[in-house]
Image (spheres, rainbow, N blue to C red):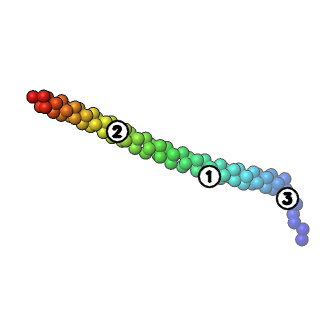
Amino acid sequence: MTTPKPTHSDTIAAGLQRQLDELREIIHRGGDGSAQQSRQSKQENDSIQKLQAEIEKQRVRIVHLLRALDNKDHVINQLQTDTSQVVKD
């Protein structure tokens, strides 16, 4: 028994099948990289947004503490002034 000789159509079909397989492999590799890169970019963006929100919270807290400190300084100055006036009298 001899194997039949492939026809021209069989050769073309086999070549096209190889090209399709190669394209699928390229897409699969590229798709994984792109998907992973997209996931990584999304994670990075999420992290950046969380950090920016945390920075804003800390900034507000610092401003609040500085204002409170200024108020305390003002109260201390008032008390010192009042004390020095009482001592003079």
Residue type, label 3: Pro
The disc at residue 6 is 3
Q: Nearer the viewer, residue 18 or 77?
A: 77
Image point (69%, 50%), residue name:
26
In percent of the image, x 54 and y 45: which residue is there? Answer: 41
Camera-side residue of 62 and 29: 62
Q: CA distance from mark 1 to mark 2?
A: 44 Å
- Does the residue at mark 1 contact the one at mark 2 (Cβ under 8 Å)? no
Q: Residue furthest front?
A: 88
Does the rendering let one see residue 30?
A: yes
Q: Residue furthest bottom?
A: 1
Residue type pointed to by label 1: Asp
- The image position of residue 51, as x and y in percent, is 44, 44
Residue tagged by mark 2? Answer: 62
In the depicted structure, whether residue 49 falls above or below residue 15:
above
For badge 2, the amino acid type reads Ile
Q: Earlier in the sequence, mark 3 or mark 2?
A: 3
Q: Is residue 4 above or below residue 82?
A: below
In this view, the mark in front (1 or 3): 1
Residue at the spot of label 1: 32
- Secondary structure, mark 1, is helix
Compared with residue 27, is residue 87 higher up or lower down, i.e. above or below? above
Q: Earlier in the sequence, mark 1 or mark 2?
A: 1
The image position of residue 17, as x and y in percent, is 75, 54
Of labels 1 and 3, earlier in sequence is 3
In the shown orientation, is residue 30 left or right of residue 76?
right
* Quarter of the image where one finds residue 49: top left
